[in-house]
Image (cartoon, grey):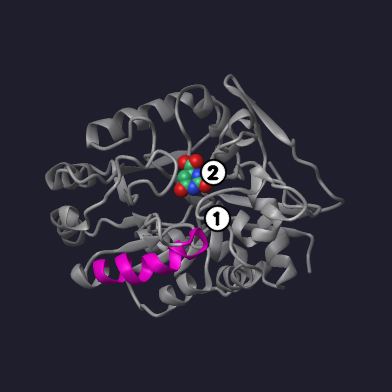
Amino acid sequence: MSDHLTIRRPDDWHLHLRDGAMLAAVLPETARHFARAIVMPNLVPPVVTGAEAAAYRDRIRAALPAGMVFEPLMTLYLTEGTDPEDVAAAHASGLIKAVKLYPAGATTNSASGVTDFNKIAAVLERMAEIGLPLCTHGEVTDADVDIFDREAVFIDRVLDPLRRAHPGLKVVMEHITTAQAAEYVRSVDTGLGATITTHHLVINRNHILVGGIKPHYYCLPVAKREEHRLALVAAATSGDPRFFLGTDSAPHIDALKEHACGCAGCFTATNTMSILAEVFEAESALDRLEGFTSLNGPAFYGMPANEARLTLIKGPPFHYPSKIDSADGPVTVFDPGFPLHWQVDD
Ligand code: DOR
Ligand code: ZN
């Protein structure tokens, strides 16, 4: 195997950029390697309307350091009060590329999410008509459902009925963490895709809990058993175009991660491409890395792949900074727990 790998420039199909000082700190970490990213709308308050998405896009553009090229792909946060016409207008103008469904209470800043799925039927109908994808945080929030089962139960109780009620709707199952989710994606020929994060290809639930609690490995959906991690690695490295990279890189300052009630999120923007190269090389699948990071996502979203290229070079173990600084405080970079040999030639 060669020690150089040149691929089309990757995109991140699920990213948290935040706002203000945190946006300024994390945006260069993504823009250094990625051409575009689907930007999550779970700000406080959330990005609900087209006007709010346009203003957020402008703040992202303004925060981009001179000389960097990056295109934010905006999303709207779906609420029970979302206006289908506002969504359609934001799509028609080219402003938004997806709408994000958070079940109320499922994760960080999801309080404005959906409780009664009947109340979003008209928006979903309009989205199906215009071909606008729905990105789902696929976890039920029922107190009686164990946190490790919440994704699998979501498929049966929410996602499958929702897809049957809106057969033309394009859906992305975001950050899948289970063999059941990968299997569900494979059971559908068109209109259903899934993003997989970098960290869920690397850690299982033992990494979070064995030998002391590791707050920087805690995210939602929480990592599951090893058999599920292996199913995700198999899906990501299979070449199946229904699976593509969405890092879910989600910065929180250390003070809020290392806390009695620690925030959910792993920050992987900085070292994702090097980690993925290790994961794919271990599966003898380096030739499929480009599909996962740079081809399958654009194809699903109906966009061209990037013309620019990115080169990874294999050498002695390479160390990324363990933290990046923001004006709000330091953010810990995800530690894969193994050496990284593939360095992005930037
Ligand atoms: O771990 C997570 N962090 N999962 C999410 O769904 C949200 C994200 C965040 O915004 O911090
Ligand atoms: Zn997310």
| 311 in relation to 67, above or below | below
- Rate crowding at label 1 as few (under 14), some (14 to 19) or many (20 or more) other CA atoms within 10 Å: some
Q: Please provide the residue range marked out in magenta.
A: 146-162
Count of numbered circles on the image: 2
Which SS class for mark 2? loop
Q: Is residue 173 visible?
A: yes
2 and 1 marks in contact (CB < 8 Å): yes
Which of the 4 image quadrants contains residue 42? top left
Does 277 appear above or below 258? below
Whole-angstrom CA distance, mark 2 to mark 1, is 8 Å
Question: Is residue 8 in the magenta section?
Answer: no
197 over 53 or under it: above or below: below
Residue 148 within the magenta-colored segment of the rendering: yes
Residue located 26% across and 44% down the image? 94
**Mark 1 residue element:** loop
Q: Is mark 2 within 8 Å of ligand 1?
A: yes
Q: Which residue shows up at 50% across the image and 50% down it?
A: 12
Name the quarter where the N terminus is drawn: bottom right
Sequence-wise, which precedes: disc 2 or disc 1? 1
Q: Is residue 196 above or below residue 181?
A: above
- CA neighbours of label 2 inside 10 A, class few (<14), some (14 to 19), many (20+): many
- Residue highlighted by disc 2: 264
